[in-house]
Amino acid sequence: MIDDLYSTRILTLAANLPHAGRLAAPDGTGERVARLCGSRAIVDVVLDPEGRVARFAQDIKACALGQAAAGVLGEAVIGATVDEVRTARDDTLVMLKSGGEGPTGRFEGLQALQQVADYPARHASTLVAIEATLDAVSAALARRGATAGAA
């Protein structure tokens, strides 16, 4: 039954990890670890003047599901606002926990992970990259606000 979870689509997404690595001088960094399985994501971002993701890098050490979610994220995150990332995270949570359809728009590729809803032990790994991205963008915006306040 769990073999159905690791579909060709999931394995293809997991094998293609856009923007792998780290940025030399990020505006913000986020790190998340899924305690149950140890999946880890470190995400660096640089924001444009309007607060959208201009540059993005991710260092992912996760199972195929976590890597698949990171693959979707890496394909879609450039140009995203903090609200878009937050909405994608929230819609993914609803998809996993309450049977929702999943994100639409730029992050609709996360719908490929709908079957993970049947495996609660895999939810945290699936969310690790998007949570780290949200943390990174939030940190970058907070840093920008602190810098503007100090001027």
Image: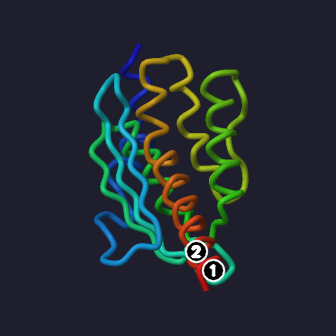
Residue 101 quadrant: top right
Depth-wise, is mark 2 or mark 1 nearer the camera?
1
Q: Residue at x 49, y 59 (%)?
A: 136
Residue 71 position (above or below residue 56): above
Q: Residue at x 72, y 29 (%)?
A: 100
Q: Position of residue 85 (x, y in %)?
A: 63, 54
Q: Residue at x 34, y 22 (%)?
A: 36
Q: Which residue is mark 1?
A: 148
- Residue 82's disc is none
Kindly identify the amino acid type of the residue bearing the numbered disc 2. Arg
Residue situated in front as seen by the camera: 17 or 146: 146
In this view, which residue lies farthest toward the front? 150
Residue 61 position (above or below residue 99): below
Q: Is residue 91 left or right of residue 46?
A: right
Residue 115 position (above or below residue 54): above
Residue situated in front as seen by the camera: 63 or 28: 28
Quick one: label 1, few (<14), some, or many (20+) residues within 10 Å?
Answer: few
Q: Is residue 24 left or right of residue 129?
A: left
Is label 1 in a helix, a strand or a loop?
Answer: helix
Q: Residue at x 64, y 84 (%)?
A: 49
Kindly identify the amino acid type of the residue bearing the numbered disc 1. Ala
Q: Is residue 124 left or right of residue 149?
A: left
In the rendered picture of this protein, how many numbered marks are placed on residues?
A: 2
Q: Are marks 2 and 1 in contact (CB under 8 Å)?
A: yes
Split into 4 quadrants, where in the image is the N terminus?
A: top left
Residue 141 position (above or below residue 132): below
Quick one: label 2, few (<14), some, or many (20+) residues within 10 Å?
Answer: some
- Residue 144's disc is 2
Q: Position of residue 113 (x, y in %)?
A: 53, 35
